Each structure stands twice: as structure tokens, then as C-alpha cells.
Amino acid sequence: MNPPVPESKFGERWSWLIAWAVLMAVLFASLRLWQANDPVAEAAGRGVAHLEDRLAGLAPEEARSSARKLAVLFTDNFVRPYADAARILTSGWGLIFGVIIPGAVTFLGALVTHLVLSVTGGAAAGWRETFRVFAFNRIIAEALSAALVMMAVSLDWGLAIKFVLLFFGLPFVRLVVAVHLVVSVCRTHRLGVVRVLLLGVPGTIAGAILTAILALVPAAWFWLHCALAALLAA
């Protein structure tokens, strides 16, 4: 019979898996944020409603009710399917850029980093800690990014301020978090000065550039939502 696993060892063994489970929950929560602020789906829905209003408005006042029914019938058969297809397509984009790419980049980053550390002198804390650090770091990045997006979308600020917040704020968040990631990896595995300089500095630069570029995609997505909302409110 196997002896019971001490509580501290149990925590070390499963903490990385818990961190990845929390990460996936955070990514799917951020997907809901993407879907709720989908500029293409919103524009398509508004466009269909506007077309129905314009078609019904062409009829005389006494025939408006029948004209609206005909307009709805027309859009249901010839326009709305394309609007629904646009919603499905952009939902796929949200899944790709909001869940699949962040999750894949985090997993591959942890895998490659651990392999490099193992080849160049070892990873003292083990692979579980490498994966835990990467997952926890991504959770921080997604949480800060979501907070920034919600602030930009919900507050009644000018479009220019929202542009600056999203197009410069989101990449800046990723730059800071990339530095935090490298520092966390170095501290967790107790890397020496040589490996910090040879691996940590290039890793910080490469990771910061990659994540900052990827952050421009959600920045464009949410700014388009803000721009569309401002246009419709005008």
C-alpha cells in the first residue's frame, strides 16, 4: 500500500494543474468579453434593423404594418443569413485570438523554456513549476487586459482616449507581464547570473515583442466596437 502523500508535496504536485484550470476559465471568460463587444456582429444586426426600417418607410402610412412584415420576410430570406454568418465568423475569431492563441502560446512557451533550461544546466524546481509560472503569468496578463478593456468600453470617454488606452495600454500590459514572467522563471529555478544574462535578457525581449504584437489584435477589435458605438450614438 502506498504511503499517503504529504500535504505540501500534494500541493506541489497539483498546483500547476490548478493554475492551468484557472487559466482556461479566465480565457473563456475573456471570450465572453470578446463576444459581447463584437463590432462586426453588432454592425450586422444594426444594418438589418435599419434596412427593415427603410423598406417599411417607403410604403404609405396606412400600409406600414404590412410593409414591415414584407421587409422582415425579405431580410429573413436574403439578408439576415449573411448577418448570422458574420456573427458566426467573428465568434470564431474571438475563439482563435481570445482562447486558442493565448493558450497555445503559453503552453509552447512553457515547454520550450523548460527544454532550454534542461539543456543549459537544468531547471531546479522541475517542469511542474515551469508550467505553473507560465499559467499564473498568463492569468495576470488576461485579468489586467480585461480590466483595461472594460474600463475603455464602459466609461464615457472620448474615442481618442479609448484609442490610446487600447492600442498602447494593452501592448504595455503585455510588455510588463513579459518581464514579470522572466523574473519569475529565474527566481523559481534559481538561475545563475550567466544564464540570466544569456537566456533571460533575450527571452524578455523576444517574449515582450511577441505578446505586444499579439495584443494589437484585441486592441483593434475593442476599439472598433467603441468607434461603432460612438458612430451609432451620434
Image: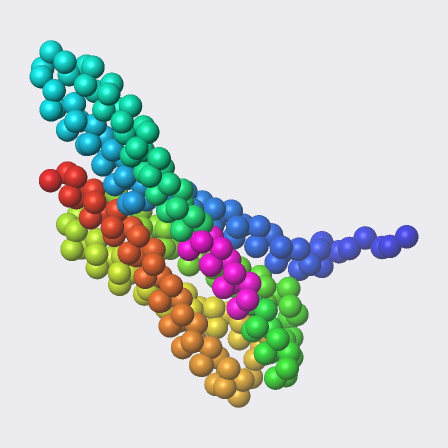
Q: Is residue 168 magenta?
A: no
Judge whether residue 142 can be spotted in this image. no
Q: Is residue 64 above or below residue 147?
A: above
Is 114 displayed left or right of 149 in the figure? right
36 vs 93, nearest the viewer: 93
Question: If the image is split into quadrants, where does the C terminus sit?
Answer: top left
Q: Is residue 114 left or right of residue 164?
A: right
Q: How many marks?
A: 0
- At a point 51% along the width and 58% down the height, the residue shown is 103
- Residue 83 placement (x, y as % from top left): 32, 38
Say if 110 sits above or below 194 in the image.
above
Observer able to see residue 25? yes
Seen in the picture, residue 103 relative to 175 is either above or below; the reply is above
| Residue at left offset 23%, top offset 30% | 49
Q: Residue furthest top?
A: 62
Question: Where is residue 20 shown, x and y percent of the image?
Answer: 57, 54
The single residue placed furthest to the right in the displayed view is: 1
| Residue interval drawn in magenta | 96-109
The residue under the point 23% across, 47% down is: 226
Q: Residue furthest left?
A: 60
**How is the rendered protein coloured?**
rainbow
Using the image, determine if residue 105 lies above or below residue 139. below
x and y percent of residue 2 in the render?
Answer: 87, 55
The residue under the point 15% across, 50% down is 158
Quadrant hosting residue 55: top left
Magenta includes 108?
yes
Q: Main secondary structure of the magenta part?
A: helix
As rendered, which of 187 and 52 lies closer to the eye? Answer: 52
